[in-house]
Structures are given as structure tokens and as C-alpha cells.
Image: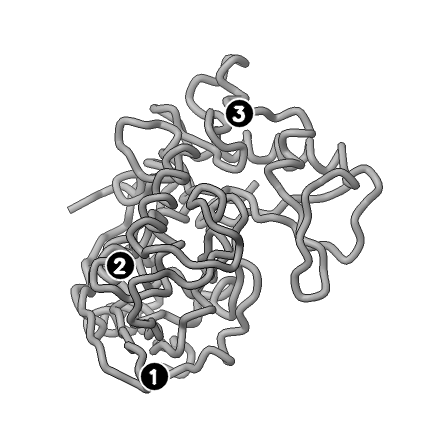
């Protein structure tokens, strides 16, 4: 049984756990959370640990490894409703749906972590996000002490956010996706992906081709987990692309997208233009942490790092971007028992 959070996170950082339990089913997950709440014991849920930064002091209470793994399907108006337990590894699910000829998740290939975490962040990549295909989920409400069915309208999905993101009140138990049986993908909206596939934006391509191309793109950015590649010892994108009502003049050249009436800027561009290039930190005597050598949004553990060292680097980048552009970047990762 793991004794430190470093053993449970893709960053390989985090101090000791008070105690660790494994929830192999949704019922067991509810039971463990409810019992800890009744005892006043702090609870930390861990799935794939791919978006989690835990302090060097660790977690003083109960760490629950979410390992529920059931998947069920039913037909509905020509589509497949696939209900997936929270502990199912996300990319295993994507791979299985692509192999079975079900379209809807293929552009989100290679994203680490568990299925239950995807609604929290409204996970997305290459022009698609979980909110596009999610039709419902079950949650355990820790305040009301009951299991509730939720529709997507209650989830308050936005860009990399949801009603779950800034609260520990709700525990996702399972998620239902509406997928389409088709040999072709959903329309590819992301220009880089469309170009790599040799199609125009808005066109479709064979499911397996889309998945393979996405995996290649993510590997080139160090975003596919690989024990031998320290660029993947990260939480993926550490900072979220900022959404602004008004773009400062200093950032006029930044790539941007319109989202919900606001302007989303490229955090990677802001970081690079503020002087933090790929690999930044490796040549400055840090040794243990750096910006990824493949992608400026990823902060990486080069081996032997501490969470404090990683957050010191994060703060330096955040402050540098704010000084250069007047824009304060926020973390996309979940920070537990630590801050910067």
C-alpha cells in the first residue's frame, strides 16, 4: 500500500498519507467518504493523480484511491449511452470506444487520469471537451449525505471548469456519455489536428487515425505519460489559459479565442514572451524542476524534486507574466495542502 502521495501522482511529488484506502466500487467509495466525514477526518480522493499537486507535508487524513471500474451501455435513439465508473482510466475508455467504433471521445486520447475527474475540469483537447458528450452523472453530496443524479445543465460547465472544481462537497461516482456509432470521428474543429490528418476543419476522419494522430501530437509535447521521459512527470498544463473581458495592450500579439463572450489568451505564449522558454530552469542551477523541454505550459519534476521547489518555479512564472503583461495566471492543477 502506498505511503506517500508521490507514489500516487504523475508529478511524483507529495508527502506522507495519514492512511490509504482503496474504493473498488461506487458503494465502497460512498461508504469510505461518509465514514470519514462522520469522524471529522480530512479526505483526499485520488484517481490517476494526473492533475494533483500535494504539499511536502502530505495529507494528514484519509487518502482514497478511486478504483471503481464498471462500464455499462444501452441504446438510445440510435446512439450509445455509455455509463462509466469514476475509477476507470480515461484513456483506457477512449481506446475501447474507438476500437468499438464509437465516436465522440477520440480527440481526447492520451489524457491521463480517471473518468470521474473529467467533469470536474471539463477536460478537453483539440477542439472537444467532456461537456460535448456528457448526458448525466451520479454524485455523492457530502453535505446532504445522499447520492444524486445530475444532468449536464446542473454542472455549470465552462472552459476547464464546472460546479465541482472549487468545492469538495460532491464526489463523482459515475458518468454517462452519449456516443455515436460511426467509423468516422466527430467533425475535427482544431486546425493543427485537421492539418495533420490532411483534412479541412469541420471534416471527419477515421476514428483510429484521429486517435493515433492525437497521441503523436501529445507525445511531441511530453503530454503522454512515460516513466523514462521527465517531461511527462507533470500535471500536464499547470496554468489555465486566462479568460479576460479586456486584453491589455501589452498582450495584443497573443493568440486568442472568443469563449462565452470573453477572450481566451494562450498562457503558453504569455509564458514564453515573459522570458520563460522550454527547459527554463535547467540552465539556472535548479536541476530538480523546470519548464518542460517540449511544452511551456508544463512544469516538470526532473527527479528528486520537492513540491516546494515546483511551486517556487510556478510563482516565478506567474509573477513574471504579471509583470510583463498585467495578467495573473491561475493554476489548472488542483493544489492540496500547498499554495503558491
Q: Position of residue 310 (x, y in %)?
A: 48, 32
Q: CA distance from mark 2 to mark 1?
A: 34 Å
Q: Do the residues bearing badges 3 and 1 touch, measured as CB atoms within 8 Å?
A: no
Name the image quarter holding residue 138: bottom left
CA separation in Å, label 3 and label 2: 33 Å
| N-terminal-most mark, 3 or 1 | 1
State the mark number for residue 146. 1
The structure residue drawn at horizontal position 25% and vertical position 62%, both measured from the top left corner, is 97
Q: Is residue 192 above or below residue 94?
A: above
Which residue corresponds to the image point at 37% horizontal and 60% vertical from the top-left?
Answer: 185
Q: Mark 2–mark 1 contact, CB under 8 Å?
A: no
Question: On residue 98, which mark appears?
Answer: 2
Tell me: 50 left or right of 30: right
Would you call the spot at circle 1 few (<14 residues within 10 Å), some (14-19), or many (20 or more)? few
Quadrant of residue 287 within the rendered picture: top left
Q: Pointer 2: residues within 10 angstroms few (<14), some, or many (20+)? A: many
Mark 2 and mark 1 lie on one chain; the one further toward the N terminus is 2
Q: Are marks 3 and 2 in contact (CB under 8 Å)?
A: no
Q: In which image quadrant can residue 120 be found?
A: bottom left
Q: Which residue is mark 3?
A: 278
> Label 3: few (<14), some or many (≥20) within 10 Å?
many
Is residue 112 in view?
no
Q: Position of residue 107 (x, y in %)?
A: 40, 54
Q: Position of residue 195 (x, y in %)?
A: 49, 43
Q: Residue 278, relative to residue 297: is it above or below?
A: above
Identify the secondary structure beneath mark 2: helix
Q: Check the image and name the residue furthest to the bottom.
A: 77
Can you say which quadrant of the picture contains the C terminus? top right
Spatial CA span between label 3 and label 1: 47 Å
Amino acid at each position: 500500500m502506498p505511503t506517500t502521495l508521490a507514489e500516487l501522482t504523475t508529478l511524483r511529488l507529495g508527502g506522507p498519507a495519514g492512511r490509504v484506502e482503496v474504493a473498488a466500487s461506487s458503494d465502497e467509495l460512498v461508504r469510505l467518504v461518509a465514514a470519514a466525514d462522520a469522524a471529522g477526518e480530512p479526505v483526499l480522493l485520488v484517481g490517476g493523480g494526473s492533475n494533483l499537486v500535494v504539499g511536502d507535508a502530505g495529507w494528514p487524513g484519509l487518502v482514497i484511491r478511486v478504483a471503481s471500474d464498471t462500464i455499462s451501455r444501452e441504446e438510445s435513439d440510435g446512439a450509445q449511452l455509455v455509463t462509466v465508473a469514476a475509477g476507470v482510466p480515461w484513456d483506457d475508455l477512449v481506446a475501447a470506444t474507438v476500437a468499438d467504433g464509437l465516436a465522440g471521445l477520440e480527440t481526447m486520447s492520451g489524457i491521463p487520469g480517471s473518468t470521474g475527474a473529467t467533469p470536474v475540469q471539463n477536460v478537453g483537447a483539440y477542439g472537444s471537451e467532456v461537456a460535448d458528450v456528457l448526458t448525466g452523472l451520479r454524485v455523492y453530496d457530502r453535505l446532504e449525505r445522499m447520492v444524486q443524479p445530475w444532468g449536464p445543465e446542473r454542472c455549470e460547465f465552462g472552459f476547464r471548469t464546472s460546479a465541482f472544481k472549487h468545492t469538495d462537497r460532491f464526489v463523482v461516482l459515475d458518468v454517462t456519455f452519449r456516443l455515436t456509432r460511426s467509423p468516422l470521428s466527430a467533425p475535427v474543429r482544431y486546425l493543427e489536428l485537421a492539418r495533420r490528418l490532411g483534412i479541412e476543419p469541420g471534416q471527419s476522419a477515421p476514428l483510429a487515425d484521429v486517435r493515433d494522430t492525437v497521441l503523436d501530437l501529445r507525445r511531441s509535447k511530453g503530454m503522454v505519460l512515460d516513466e523514462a521521459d521527465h517531461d511527462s512527470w507533470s500535471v500536464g498544463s499547470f496554468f489555465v489559459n486566462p479568460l479576460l473581458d479586456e486584453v491589455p495592450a501589452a498582450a495584443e500579439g497573443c493568440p486568442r479565442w472568443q469563449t462565452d463572450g470573453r477572450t481566451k489568451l494562450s498562457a503558453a505564449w504569455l509564458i514564453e514572451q515573459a522570458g520563460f522558454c522550454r527547459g527554463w530552469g535547467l540552465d539556472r542551477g535548479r536541476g530538480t524542476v523546470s519548464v518542460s523541454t517540449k511544452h511551456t505550459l508544463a512544469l516538470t519534476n526532473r527527479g528528486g524534486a520537492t513540491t516546494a521547489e515546483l511551486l517556487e518555479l510556478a510563482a516565478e512564472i506567474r509573477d513574471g507574466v504579471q509583470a510583463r503583461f498585467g495578467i495573473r495566471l491561475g493554476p489548472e492543477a488542483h493544489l492540496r495542502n500547498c499554495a503558491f
